[in-house]
Amino acid sequence: MKEGDEALPVSGVLAVVDGAWYENAGLAEWMLAGVEVANRAKLRISPESEERTARAVEIGPDPLVRTYGLSNRVPLEKRSPVTVGELRTVAPVKIGGPLGHGFDTGTATGLYLNSSFVVRPPDFAMEDPDAWWMGKLEFRRLVLAEGIAGYWAGTSASPARSRSGQLSITQHTITAPPQASAANISIEAQLAITADKTAQCSLEIGVEWDGDTCTLVIDGAKSEKVTLKNVTFDLRVLTIRHTSLIDPDGSQRFAWFEILLLVREHDGHWFVAWQTRWLDAPPDNAADTSEAELTLSLEVTPTDAAVGPMRVSRALQGPSRPRGVGHSFCRIWRCLGVSAGCRSTACR
């Protein structure tokens, strides 16, 4: 696999979709791929320890060839995590495509029945390409908010309020400030439980520029950075509302939210940089919050940072339930096909 002119040591995964792309929303259709995150609401390390919440991405070396599990240490250490704080929660993957294909031959207007996307492995897999990385991937068909009518009309500001199923705020064209090499992005959500009580969650993202690259430090996890190969990017926070029963024997429901942090490098595609759940426990007073108003805010500091327009969308952008499947990222031993530098169908 090549990333521009650079040959990657680890192969990607070919995801084949049943159906032609761009049929539902035209050029506004895109595919999101990500590594599933395992959540444990109550995890006890030892009989004497307290219960705590734990999250970890479902990816790691093949246990047939490696004896260590994936941790959040950078650079990658071949040693399993021993504490909850060492579990890795960030494993962004990018995709390329779509490629249309079918069984119609001998015609210039072929019938394309399927679409394919190439899922690139996470960056840390390049540090141990012989580990035959295994992971559980999830896929979502995304309708780009910027391709929906009315998105660019007028102006939008933070905070945004909504009772609908999905809400997003996008800060377009974030780039290095003239007099600084760092910035901070604050995201906060508040859910109205009662007239005088709210529940809130927040996220801090540090942005560090260094020459021609940019690094995102998400939620203070300095060992889990997302590196961008461009100094200019767009950032979108998308909230997806879910509801669950407070009591299995009752009818009251509470709202909880899936949070997707999407990033798009300049002239690139959207990818999932980070994901989590917010407010995924019933409120203390057992109030029904299934239709409660959500207030979402996004702020970039310093306030004179070089940014473009901010836009808010309440449109349905993606399904509430992703499709998950297990895959392996393997070291490239053969290139199957004809490349510019090789005229053999199988070359070392």
Image (cartoon, helix red, strand yellow):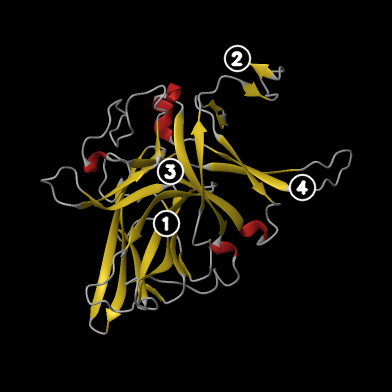
Packing grade of label 2 (10 A; few <14, some 14-19, many >=20) is few
Q: For numbered disc 2, what is the local secondary structure? A: loop
Which residue was labeled with disc 1?
Answer: 260
Vertical placement of residue 338 versus 275, above or below: above
Classify residue 198 by image quadrant.
bottom left
Q: Is mark 1 on a helix, strand or loop?
A: strand
Query: What residue is drawn where x is 27% and y is 27%?
Result: 79
Sequence-wise, which precedes: disc 3 or disc 4? 3
Closer to us: 218 or 302 = 218
Marks 1/2 in contact by CB < 8 Å: the verdict is no
x%, y% of residue 96?
A: 58, 41
Q: Which amino acid does label 2 sit on?
A: Arg
CA gap, disc 1 and disc 4: 31 Å
The residue type indicated by label 1 comes to Leu
- In the image, farthest residue toward the bottom: 195
Asked which secondary structure carries label 4, the reply is loop
* Circle 3/circle 1 CB separation < 8 Å: no
Q: Mark 4 points at which residue?
A: 112
- Residue marked by disc 2: 348
Residue of label 3: 92
- Decide which of tag 3 and tag 1 comes sooner along the chain: 3
